[in-house]
C-alpha cells in the first residue's frame, strides 16, 4: 500500500512537472 501510494505520488508529481 505504501509503495503503491508513493509510486502514485511520484507519478502525479512527474505529470505536474512534465
Image: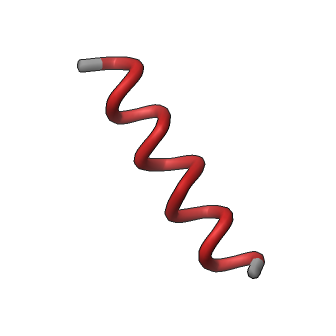
Report the coloring of the rendering.
secondary structure
| Residue 17 percent across, percent down from the top left | 76, 76
Name the residue rendered at 48%, 37% in the picture. Answer: 7
Q: Looking at the figure, which quarter contains the C terminus? A: bottom right
Above or below: residue 8 compared with residue 1: below
Residue extending farthest to the top is 2
Q: Looking at the figure, which quarter contains the N terminus? A: top left
Name the residue rendered at 47%, 33% in the picture. Answer: 6
Figure label count: 0
Residue extending farthest to the left is 1
Q: Is residue 5 left or right of residue 10?
A: left
Residue extending farthest to the right is 17
Above or below: residue 14 compared with residue 4: below
| Residue 16 percent across, percent down from the top left | 64, 79
Q: Is residue 14 left or right of residue 2?
A: right
Name the residue rendered at 34%, 18% in the picture. Answer: 2
Above or below: residue 13 compared with residue 3: below
Q: Is residue 11 left or right of residue 13?
A: left
Name the residue rendered at 59%, 48% in the picture. Answer: 10
| Residue 15 percent across, percent down from the top left | 61, 75
Above or below: residue 17 compared with residue 5: below
Amino acid at each position: 500500500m505504501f509503495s503503491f501510494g508513493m509510486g502514485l505520488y511520484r507519478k502525479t508529481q512527474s505529470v505536474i512537472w512534465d
